[in-house]
Amino acid sequence: MNHFIRGTQGLLMMLVLCLTIDTAVAQPALQLPQPSQAATVSQTIGLTQITVNYARPVARGRTLWGSVVPYDQVWRTGANNNTTISFSTPVSIQGNDLAAGTYGLHTIPTEDEWTVIFSNNSWSWGSFNYDPAEDALRVTAQPQSADFKETMQISFPDINASAATLAIHWGDVMVPVTIDVDVTETVFAQMRRDFDNLQGFNPARLAQGAAFAAQVNTNHGEAMTWVDRAIQAQPTFANTSVKALLLMQTGSTAEAEALIAAGLDAATENEVNTFGYQLMGAGFMNKAGEMFTHNVETFASSWNVHDSLGEYYANVGQTAEAIQLYEQALSMAPANQQPRINGILTGLRDSL
């Protein structure tokens, strides 16, 4: 009996020990600071969101290029997990098309040229399992000498309306990679999705989409369907004037003039003013002048209509008329507008 009890107790102790070991194994690792700390950097170009996730290694007095980072070998472009880069829309990298998505960002450094790799594998640890068969795109970039950067940094130092420079900088080397976006096409693609959804039932949004097409002077056929839907739902001058601008851009001037004439008398000051600026932006200067003049004649007590007609005259080089209108606007304008108008007047007077 004692042997049985002792045997049973031993078995129970072994089971408890096994459970304790299993429980210990199942516990998550302690959260401790990493030598190469995680970082995220994002940049928007138009509607395109670009996000880089990476870990930032530290130089710590080491020789980096050709040593810590060997030449002619695939590098994870950071530390720990491979660096990833995400694009919310299609982009162009160094002039090469790349689809929207998330990619592993690897590089092959050499002294004179780097190969920058966008891999369809975005989940691996480092570059140890890198497979060229998973490449989505390879481009080359030229390394540049730069001020010493102790901790590796990926950034977007240069940005404009349709492009950005992605810079990989560590030690005394910086590698720039150009990213371009077809902003107009991405905007149209987003609007198509929006107009297939609830925004397609909103007349103001439909007209706004058509106005964008007029602003960039493209995609007139599709824009015309949008603005026609807007007019059918809400026949305002704001909507019909967008259609008139599209008609003018496609050469249907008589039809545009008829639309404008039919709605002008009922139009608000803001609607006519907005249309004037749309016409001016599209290069229809004479028609823009007519709209701004109509507003001055119809809403003479508004400082803003004098300001807008003054801007028109300044743009067409009629400086004396512009000064007269800005002086009238200044005499009527609220205090928060007066410094701006005074600045414009000073510039106009100095130009005479």
Image (cartoon, helix red, strand yellow):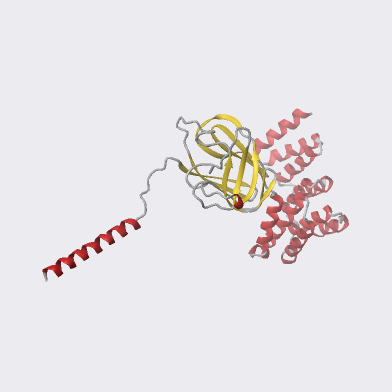
Query: Is residue 335 at least partly visible in the picture?
Result: no
The image quadrant where one finds the C terminus is top right
Which residue corresponds to the image point at 80% horizontal and 54% vertical from the top-left?
A: 245
Query: Is residue 122 at least partly visible in the picture?
Result: yes
128 shown above or below 62: below
| Residue 252: % across, % down | 86, 56
| Residue 26: % across, % down | 35, 58
Please tell me which residue lies in front, 14 or 38.
14
**Residue positioned most to the bottom:** 1
**Residue positioned most to the front:** 3
Please tell me which residue lies in front, 56 or 107.
107
| Number of numbered tags placed on the structure image | 0
Which residue corresponds to the image point at 21% horizontal and 62% vertical from the top-left?
A: 13
Please tell me which residue lies in front, 205 or 24.
24
206 shown above or below 311: below
268 shown above or below 155: below
| Residue 68: % across, % down | 50, 35
**Residue positioned most to the left:** 2
The image quadrant where one finds the N terminus is bottom left
Identify the image quadrant of residue 310: top right
Left or right: residue 9 compared with residue 290: left
**Residue positioned most to the right:** 254
Which residue corresponds to the image point at 74% horizontal and 57% vertical from the top-left?
A: 210
| Residue 143: % across, % down | 61, 34
